[in-house]
Image: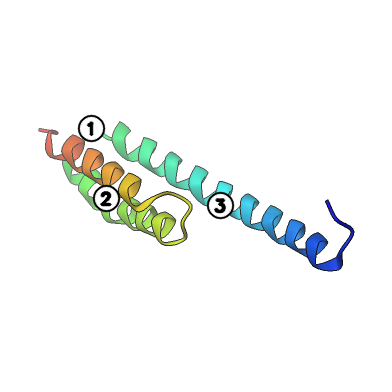
């Protein structure tokens, strides 16, 4: 790493962003896991909009790719629609 002030600042900023992205990603993965564990269709549909919103925000912030977000949402919807 160079000893320039701007480079040191960039390292600090990237570390902050990395921690924030890890937090958002982990929170979303936990929410997805919780949603998929629900066996009641009505309860799952109630929490669905919150999880989809979280996934869309990750894609908007470029934490995950937009196609991955679409694949995640598709898989979740298939799983919920298959519930009795």
Q: In the rendering, at what x and y percent does residue 66 appear?
A: 34, 53
Q: Quadrant of residue 32?
A: top left
The tag on residue 39 is 1
Residue at the bottom extreme, as displayed = 6
Residue that carries the numbered disc 3 in the rendered image: 21
Query: Closer to the camera: disc 2 or disc 3?
Result: 3
Residue 57 drawn above or below residue 76: below
Marks 1 and 3, Cα distance to the nearest angstrom? Answer: 30 Å
The tag on residue 10 is none
Marks 2 and 3, Cα distance to the nearest angstrom? Answer: 22 Å
* Label 2: how many Cα within 10 Å (few below 14, some 14–19, many 20+): many
Is mark 1 in CB contact (under 8 Å) with mark 2? no
The tag on residue 48 is 2
Q: Which of marks 2 and 3 is nearer the N terminus?
A: 3
Q: Quadrant of residue 80?
A: top left
Q: Earlier in the sequence, mark 1 or mark 2?
A: 1
Residue 52 drawn above or below residue 79: below
Q: What element carries label 3?
A: helix
Is mark 1 in CB contact (under 8 Å) with mark 3? no
């Amino acid at each position: 790493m160079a000893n320039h002030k701007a480079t040191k600042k960039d390292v600090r900023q990237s570390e902050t962003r990395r921690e924030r992205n890890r937090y958002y990603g982990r929170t979303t993965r936990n929410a997805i896991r919780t949603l998929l564990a629900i066996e009641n269709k009505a309860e799952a549909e109630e929490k669905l909009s919150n999880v989809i919103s979280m996934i869309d925000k990750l894609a908007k912030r470029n934490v995950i790719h937009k196609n991955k977000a679409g694949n995640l949402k598709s898989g979740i919807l298939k799983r919920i629609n298959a519930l009795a």
